[in-house]
Image: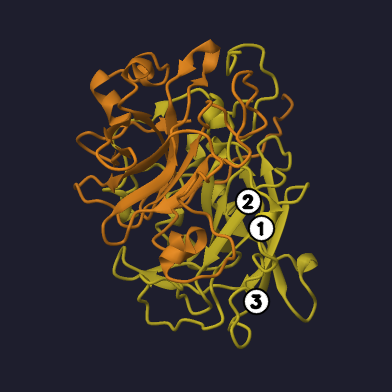
Amino acid sequence: MVQSLDYLKETASQTAGPYVHIGLIPKQAGFDIFENNFTNILADENTRGERIIVEGRVIDGTGTPLRDALLEIWQANADGRYNHELDRQKSGKVDEGFRGWGRTGTDFDTAVYRFETIKPGVVSGRNNRDMAPHINFWIVARGINIGLNTRMYFADEADKNANDPVLNLIEQHERRKTLIASLDDSGPLPVYRFDIVLQGENETVFFDV
Amino acid sequence: MEFYQRDRTLQPAGYTPIYKTSVARSPRQSLLSLQGSLSEVTGPVFGQNELGPLDNDLIRNYAKDGDPIGERIIVHGRVLDENNRPVPNTLVEFWQANAGGRYRHKKDTYLAPIDPNFGGCGRALTDENGYYFFRTIKPGPYPWRNYVNSWRPAHIHFSVFGSGFAQRLITQMYFEGDPLIKECPIVHVIPDEDAINRLIAPIDLNGSVPLDTIAYKFDIVLRGRRSTLFENRLEGN
């Protein structure tokens, strides 16, 4: 006999279900209950950095966009700093008014999600290798048993993307492009389009983080 | 500090045909294993000042002209990590159907009535010991379209953050003694019987308010962080 390891076991995940909006974005469910609501707008007037729009759809294995998905994003600020005590990078500084997190649902009619944020900077990765600017995504919905993690990179950062240590982990080069949002700069703000494909052709790379 | 590898033997797979909706919504390719970087070990921080005084009281937070119909309950417990350490100051959100099994949601068309005094959602921050609590009414079971005669056991949905984005978790709490638990396809996407049992909250008479409200205790465990980091630096200078 040996001593027993006394670790606890992680609680099992369950689907967020069709009514996730009630709990996390009640206004989309159709009612108003909280004084302070979490939203898809990450930046305020004091946030440093380039204002951008991120939008797209979440598409299932039949090619149908989900109208009931919930997405959260987590990102660094324009200096590449996360607003968190474990970010001890020496370069850049934290933006006190910028949490770096937002949530939204895909629209019940258009199936499009949208975030208003700023473009993040380069974050130092493992073993001193810089990570190209990216936004971390977490997707839950009815039919998704455990939240899906992925990253969005920026099409106009081709050189940094080419050296990104995470993109380079993806063995099939063809699949790397599933994480790169296209840029439409024809409007007042740059719009990055990032469709997430849950299954099948052009399936997005998801991470076991 | 990075997190322990997630034990996928305790977690549902994406593709679980007994839960039909998962079939078209689950990746077919393997998840790409990623060692933690700053992007995974950090996560959003929330403050008590962002919450309202009634946010953890579902009996009162949407009451218009009286209390909602249903069994008055308290749900309380701790958010811990795999190292058995409390997760303090973390946001816990919860949502549920009313006593008749109907959600206040524009897409829920079940014939049970909406309760005019019940919203069905709330939130709390854990205290320094990882403790949270809220008051609500016990939700009812309801039918759903999986098989033609599928019924969800009574449940409360939970969303928990932890201190790093890789700990992010959504789950459901079930109630001790509910005979529908053993029938439910959504419950049984979890491949481990003990892991299922850990989602079932026991009645906790000690936590109850005598002659007023009965309590259920529900602890949630998030992934633990490594405490030693001799190599593999997460970040440069």
**What hue does chain B carry in this figure?**
yellow
User: Which residue is rendered at x = 70% and y = 66% of the image?
Assistant: B53
Q: Amino acid at mark 3?
A: Arg
Q: In the picture, residue B106 is in which quadrant?
A: bottom left
Mark 2 and mark 3: span between their CA atoms?
Answer: 20 Å
Q: Earlier in the sequence, mark 2 or mark 3?
A: 3
- Is any atom of residue B66 visible in this view? yes
Q: Which residue is mark 1?
A: B124
Where residue B232 appears, x then y in whole percent?
A: 58, 13
Amino acid type for the residue under numbered disc 1: Ala
- Answer whether residue B155 is visible to the viewer in this image: no
Give coordinates of residue B107: x percent, y percent. 35, 70
Which amino acid does the dot numbered 2 rest on? Leu
- In the rendered image, the quadrant that contains the N terminus of chain B is top right
Q: Are marks 3 and 1 on the same chain?
A: yes
Image spot of residue B72 (x, y percent): 66, 77
Circle 2 Cα neighbour tier, 10 Å, few/some/many (<14 / 14–19 / ≥20): many
Residue beneath label 2, please?
B91
Subunit under mark 1: B
Cα gap from disc 2 to disc 1, whole angstroms: 6 Å
Relative horizontal placement of residue A61, taking residue A81 as reference (left or right): left
Q: Secondary structure at mark 3?
A: loop
The numbered disc on residue B60 is 3
Q: Is residue A169 left or right of residue B50?
A: left
Confirm or deny contact between disc 2 and disc 1 (CB under 8 A).
yes
The hue in which chain A appears in the rendered picture of the protein? orange
Relative to A3, say whether B63 is above or below: below
Q: Residue drawn at (54%, 43%), measured in percent from left and top?
A: B168
Q: Is residue B5 above or below residue A196?
A: above
Disc 2 on helix, strand or loop?
strand
State whether residue B171 is above or below residue B38.
Answer: below
